[in-house]
């Protein structure tokens, strides 16, 4: 399954080079699973494509 859930963080609240924490409550269709796969997508103003991290398996 792809794009089952997403969360956004405003760019003006992020400083380049500083770590950030993102918390998210999984929807019911994902919360019963043993794990999920996640990746980070970065949207740059004025560029239509997103830059993506590698995919991570997160055990729940």
Image: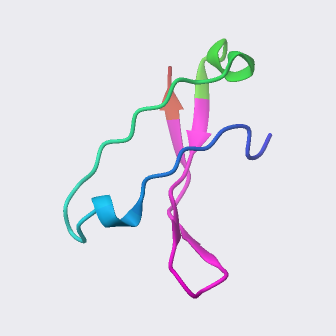
Residue found at the very far left of the displayed protein:
18
Find out whether residue 20 is within the magenta segment. no
| Magenta highlight range | 36-57
In the image, residue 50 sits, relative to residue 28, either above or below, namely below
The residue under the point 52% across, 81% down is: 45
Q: Residue furthest right?
A: 1
**Count of numbered marks:** 0
Q: Nearer the viewer, residue 2 or 57?
A: 2
Q: Nearer the viewer, residue 27 or 53?
A: 27
Q: Which quarter of the picture shows residue 33?
A: top right
How was this image coloured? rainbow
Which image quadrant: the N terminus? top right
Q: Residue at the top extreme?
A: 32
What residue appears at the point 56 percent right and 52 percent down from the top-left corner?
A: 55
Q: Is residue 15 left or right of residue 33?
A: left
Task: Report if residue 44 lies within the magenta region.
Answer: yes
Q: Tell me if residue 13 comes above or below residue 25 in the rendering.
A: below
Image point (58%, 25%), residue name: 35
With 42 as the anchor, is 31 left or right in this view?
A: right
Residue 29 % position (x, y): 75, 20
Nearer the observer, 35 or 22? 22
Q: Is residue 6 above or below residue 44?
A: above
Q: Tell me residue 4's x, y (percent).
A: 73, 38
- Indicate the position of residue 40 as horizontal and vertical percent values: 50, 56
Q: Give x and y (percent) for residue 22.
A: 38, 41
């Amino acid at each position: 399954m792809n794009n089952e859930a997403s969360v956004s963080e405003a760019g003006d609240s992020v400083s380049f080079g500083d770590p950030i924490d993102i918390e998210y409550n999984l929807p019911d269709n994902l919360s019963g699973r043993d794990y999920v796969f996640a990746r980070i997508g970065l949207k740059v103003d004025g560029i239509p494509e997103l830059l993506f991290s590698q995919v991570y398996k997160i055990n729940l």
